[in-house]
Amino acid sequence: MTARFRLFLIWFGGFLACLVLLFYFLLSGDMLIENLVPDLSVLVGVFAPYLTTILGFWFARRAVIDGQHAYSPDSFRIAAVCSLLFQMAILALLFSAIFRKGEGVIESAIGQAASVSSLLAFLVGPAIGFFFGKPK
C-alpha cells in the first residue's frame, strides 16, 4: 500500500466516520430528517476541499520519468500527522453530541466542526497538497 493511498484512507475514513455518525443521529431519532440535507452539506463542506485536493493530484500526477520519483518519508509523516490531528478534532466534536442531549446539539456540533475545519485549514491544506502534488 502506497503512502498516498494510506493518507487517502485517513481522509476518506474520517469522512466516512462522520457520515456514519450523521446517519446514526438520524436513525436514533436525535436528528430530524429535515436537517439531514443541511447537516450533510456542512459535513461535505468540511471534507470536500481536502478530498478534492487529494483526488485531484492523485489523478493528475506527473508522468514517471525513467520509472522513478524522488520520495521523502518526511512529507508523508508531516501530512499524516496534520491529517490525523484534523480528523481527531472533527470526530471529537461530532462524538461529543452523543453525550449531550437537547435541541440543536447535533447541529451545534456540526457547526463547530465546520468552524474548526476552517481554523485548521492552514495547517492541513498545504501539507496534503504538497504531499499529493509533489512527484512520488
Image (spheres, rainbow, N blue to C red):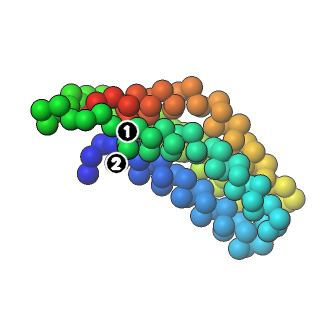
Q: Which residue is mark 1?
A: 60
The structure residue drawn at horizontal position 71% and vertical position 37%, both measured from the top left corner, is 115
Q: Position of residue 102 (x, y in %)?
A: 85, 60
Report the front residue among 128 and 85. 128
Dot label at residue 120: none
Instruction: State left or right for residue 64 relative to residue 108.
Output: left
Q: Residues within 10 Å of mark 1 (few under 14, many from 20)?
A: few
Image vertical order of residue 10 relative to residue 69, above or below: below
Mark yes or no: residue 96 visible: no
The structure residue drawn at horizontal position 34% and vertical position 48%, both measured from the top left corner, is 5
Image vertical order of residue 86 relative to residue 91, above or below: above
The structure residue drawn at horizontal position 75% and vertical position 59%, both measured from the top left corner, is 37
Secondary structure of the residue carrying tag 2 is helix
Instruction: State left or right for residue 97 relative to residue 52.
Output: right
For the residue marked with disc 1, what is the amino acid?
Answer: Ala
Mark yes or no: residue 104 visible: yes
* Furthest residue in direction left, as rendered: 66
Image quadrant occupied by the C terminus: top left
Q: Which residue is mark 2?
A: 5
